[in-house]
Amino acid sequence: MPCRCRTRANVSPPRPPPAIAIRILTPLPYTVFVDTPYGSDPLPVWERPEPQPRAAPVPLSREKIAATAIRLADAHGLDGLSLRKIAKELGVGPMRLYDYVTNRSELLDLMVDVVYARIADVGQHSEWRSTVLTIAQATREAALEHEWFADLLGGRPHLGPHALAVGEANAAALSEAPGVRGIDDLQRALGALNAFIIGAVRREVTERRTARSTGTDEAAFQASRGPYLTRMLKTGRYPTIARLVIDGAHLNAEETFNHNLALVLDGITSRPRA
């Protein structure tokens, strides 16, 4: 019995996507899409224009929304942050915020970039080492002022305009360091430096939170475990820890950060071993 299946002949292959953005689509008032080689993707919040101002009792802007969100996050942390709470704080309906940010992720992007703007204000110095040290110290100070910022470090790169400016200043300065002779050296040096800064900042923020939640600071915690620790050290099985406990001083957090930062910077910018 002959087959009655239809076949498609001379079917041309699908056309590849355009190499550059060629058109803007706006299916919703607050979302802008752009054609790229990877499909139609929404424009990042930093590239979308602000909505046109409307006649309303409470004027809004992304700057005002981000400032309110930062104030709430400083007081209650990221877990207590939502667009609904921000709208209530601003005295507007929640739907008005969606003209400016489409979701919580975009809100966090705006908040983070506001903090990076303050880090960027430290400016560049004529000497590479001073620039790197100043940016690192400003990052620590920003995380201590806005503890939620520490929670957002170490994940995907922050790509807001101020975050990129800080990253550019840091990378450009570090590229001038001795021992950093190519892109591979620069990538490794930046990775090691960022790992130290993020780890040190998160540890310090975590200790502050623990002290608040338990009502016991680090010194009081150590004193409460004193009898147990004394018994364990008397066994003689932990001689180096005994030296640290008995002879070690309670170090200042800022001095320790700066000291260790200098050590890390010396190590990653020295001439690599063969």
Image (cartoon, helix red, strand yellow):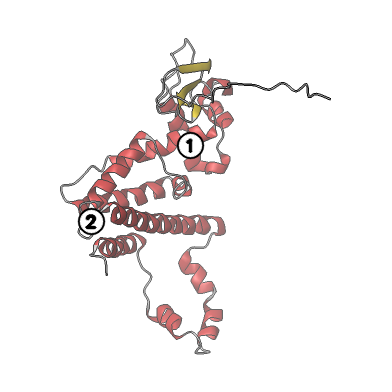
User: Which residue extends farthest front?
Assistant: 1
What secondary structure is found at the residue carrying circle 2?
loop
Q: CA distance from mark 1 to mark 2?
A: 36 Å
The mark found on residue 108 in the picture is 1
Q: Label 2, on which residue?
A: 181
Image position of 43 with respect to 55: above or below = below
Image position of 239 with respect to 60: above or below = below
Residue 60 in sight from this viewpoint: yes
Callout 1: 10 Å neighbours few (<14), some, many (20+)? Answer: some
Quadrant into which the N terminus falls:
top right
Quadrant in which residue 59 is drawn? top left
- Give residue 99's position: percent from left, percent from top: 51, 20
Camera-side residue: 162 or 94? 162
Camera-side residue: 103 or 114? 103
Indicate which disc, 1 or 2, sits on the residue closer to the N terminus.
1
User: Which residue extends farthest right?
Assistant: 1
The amino acid pointed to by label 2 is: Arg
127 on left or right of 117: left
User: Which residue extends farthest left?
Assistant: 126
Going 49% across and 14% down the picture, which residue do you hit?
A: 57
